[in-house]
């Protein structure tokens, strides 16, 4: 599956517990878009109002049609950007969205909050 078929949703509403004016997801979005441009990668990056994981910002969801969706938290704009991009790349390469443990970058191993199955195409 091509990289451009994967969307990285980023929660933009969570607040930092030490500084309620700081929104880690917003900083993560900016850093992610910048680094993707530097690496010439074309993942869709979509801010979302809430992923309901407020205690683990910054949080992303890796999603694509007919694949499992992963929600990954505890990401930091200063240190997790490349690992998040590498996680999205491993996700894009997978047939069904399930990424083998050995192929997951550290943030993907440590930060998984949930994995949701794809919707069935059956009616």
Image (cartoon, rainbow, N blue to C red):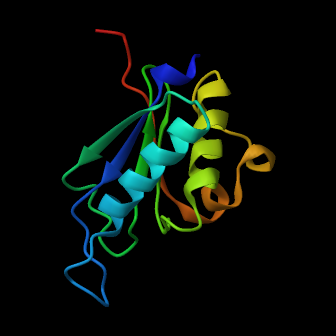
In this view, the residue in front, 122 or 80, is: 80
Image location of residue 7, percent across then percent down: 41, 32
Image location of residue 86, percent across then percent down: 65, 44
Q: Is residue 109 above or below residue 57?
A: above
> Quick check: 113 left or right of 1?
left
> Quick check: 28 left or right of 1?
left
Q: Residue at x 64, y 53 (%)?
A: 83
Q: Residue at x 27, y 70 (%)?
A: 23
Which of the image's four quarters has the C terminus?
Answer: top left
Quadrant of the rendered image containing residue 26: bottom left
Q: Residue at x 58, y 61 (%)?
A: 80
Image location of residue 32, percent across then percent down: 46, 49
Q: Residue at x 49, y 33 (%)?
A: 68
> Quick check: 44 left or right of 103?
left
The answer, for residue 24, to whether it is visible in the render is yes
Image location of residue 63, percent across then percent down: 43, 34
**Residue reaching furthest bottom?**
18
Tally the numbered discs: 0
**Residue reaching furthest right?**
102
In this view, the residue in front, 62 or 39, is: 39
Quadrant of the rendered image containing residue 100: top right
In this view, the residue in front, 119 or 112, is: 112
**Residue reaching furthest front?**
38
């Amino acid at each position: 599956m091509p990289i451009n078929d994967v969307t990285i949703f980023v929660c933009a509403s969570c607040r930092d517990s030490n500084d309620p004016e700081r929104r880690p997801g917003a900083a993560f979005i900016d850093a992610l878009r910048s680094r993707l441009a530097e690496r010439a990668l074309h993942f869709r990056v979509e801010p979302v109002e809430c992923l309901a994981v407020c205690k683990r910002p910054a949080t992303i969801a890796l999603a694509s049609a007919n694949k499992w969706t992963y929600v990954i938290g505890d990401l930091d704009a200063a240190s997790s950007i490349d690992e998040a991009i590498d996680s999205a790349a491993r996700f894009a390469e997978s047939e069904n969205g399930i990424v083998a443990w050995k192929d997951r970058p550290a943030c993907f191993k440590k930060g998984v909050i949930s994995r949701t199955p794809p919707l069935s195409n059956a009616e």
